[in-house]
Image (cartoon, coloured by chain):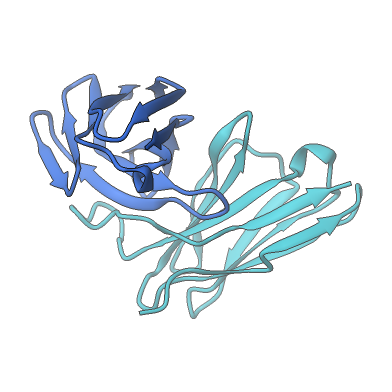
Amino acid sequence: KAGVTQTPRYLIKTRGQQVTLSCSPISGHRSVSWYQQTPGQGLQFLFEYFSETQRNKGNFPGRFSGRQFSNSRSEMNVSTLELGDSALYLCASSLAGQGASGANVLTFGAGSRLTVL
Amino acid sequence: EDQVTQSPEALRLQEGESSSLNCSYTVSGLRGLFWYRQDPGKGPEFLFTLYSAGEEKEKERLKATLTKKESFLHITAPKPEDSATYLCAVITGGGNKLTFGTGTQLKVEL
């Protein structure tokens, strides 16, 4: 069974540019979440999509956006990149709909490591 | 706002030396507490979910327990391959939003 696939794995951008990251969830998983991981802040929640709708949103500026397609694949975009956006961006997928007991296990991908110069 | 605090930040053990990692939390309406393991350059790998105080789960050398204020991850007779960062996270409210602690970096030496 294929896991969560994130592309690209590594990328380097310069300040002011924009970037799009892609996530393919485990087959059958309809919930996709995005997290930012940095040495100083740890893992921080960006947003969650379920059935093509944003269900939850973290405390990040509007430069961070995402979307989910009908096949559950998801993309996140960061516009006007800043040095502080350098991080590992992790995608996680889950079977669960809201409130499904015992089904909220999130499976993470390997991440996309973004370096902003 | 949900808060998760993990201690210690780093832990060095000799092979076979048992110990415990702590995760304390302040949340409203806990739906579940998760333990993940993360190796360098990889995404977090799921270990356990605990849903209610008093619950315990075991897997090989690891055992997770939960009270109303904290969770412990007990490591019995660790091996070097147990070296990793262990992350604790809570889920509250609707959906699948996890709030993570900053992790405990464990190193097990021969």
Residue A67, given in percent of the width and then of the height, sits at 60, 64
Q: Which residue sits furthest front?
A: B110
Residue positioned 22% across, 28% down in the render? B18
Residue positioned 54% across, 60% down in the render? A110
* Among the 4 quarters of the image, the one containing residue A26: bottom left
Residue A82, given in percent of the width and then of the height, sits at 84, 42
Residue B2 seen by the camera: no
Q: Nearest the camera: B66 or B81?
A: B81
Does A30 appear above or below B93?
A: below
Quadrant where the image shows the N terminus of chain B: top left
Residue A30, given in percent of the width and then of the height, sits at 39, 69
Q: Nearest the camera: B34 or A20?
A: B34
Quadrant where the image shows the C terminus of chain B: top left
Residue A7 seen by the camera: yes
Q: Is residue A11 left or right of residue A35?
A: right
Does B49 appear above or below A39?
A: below
Residue positioned 37% across, 43% down in the render? B80
Q: Is residue B35 left or right of residue A35?
A: left
**The hue in which chain A appears in the rendered picture of the protein:** cyan
Q: Which residue sits furthest left?
A: B54
Count of labels shown? 0
Residue A116, given in percent of the width and then of the height, sits at 83, 48
Q: Is residue A47 left or right of residue B45?
A: right
Q: Nearest the camera: B53 or A80?
A: B53
Which chain appears blue? B
Does B50 appear above or below B45?
A: above
